[in-house]
Amino acid sequence: MKELLHSDLTFRLNGRLWLEGPTDRFMGIGRLELLEKIHRLGSISKAAQEMEMSYKRAWDLVSSMNQQARQPLVSTQTGGKRGGGAVVTAEGQQMMQEFEALQARFRAFLDAETARLLH
């Protein structure tokens, strides 16, 4: 492949990784980012705002993940005197760690293949 590419340019393989269920995506980089923001901010609404996403879209993503997981990844508490909130459950935190590790292995694979193809 190296002989097919312009020698003055730098190339690298790129890709995205996601985990799909039978009818919907379960986990991908966007859903991971949403979980990370919910974990940090304690709120689906604030996480959605920070991601410039509608609350409904964020809620739909959380609902989809919760329905597909054995145990909910996000637990919510309705508003009241002290307001509502959301927490990423222990299962959600484990999913975040496992998907981040999977992403790192995927990136290493792409880097190794880039080196193999171009050198």
Image (cartoon, rainbow, N blue to C red):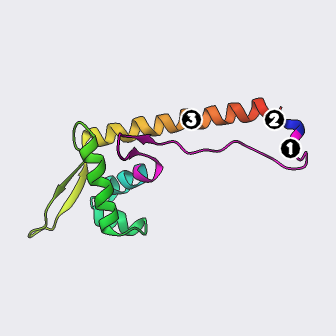
Left or right: where 15 falls relative to 41: right
Towards the viewer: 47 or 2:
2
The spot of residue 34 in percent (x, y) is 38, 55
| Label disc, if present, on residue 118 of the rendered structure | 2
Q: Amino acid at mark 1?
A: Leu
Residue 13 magenta: yes
Quadrant where the C terminus lies? top right
Q: Which amino acid type is shown beneath numbered disc 2?
A: Leu
Mark-to-mark CA distance, 2 and 1: 9 Å
Disc 2 and disc 1 in contact, CB within 8 angstroms:
yes
Write down the residue under mark 1: 5
Q: Is residue 76 left or right of residue 31?
A: left
Q: Which mark is residue 100?
A: none
Which badge, 1 or 3, comes first in the chain's sequence? 1
Closer to the chain start, of discs 2 and 1, is 1
Residue at 56 percent across and 35 percent down: it is 106
* First to last magenta residue range: 4-31
For the N terminus, give its image quadrant: top right
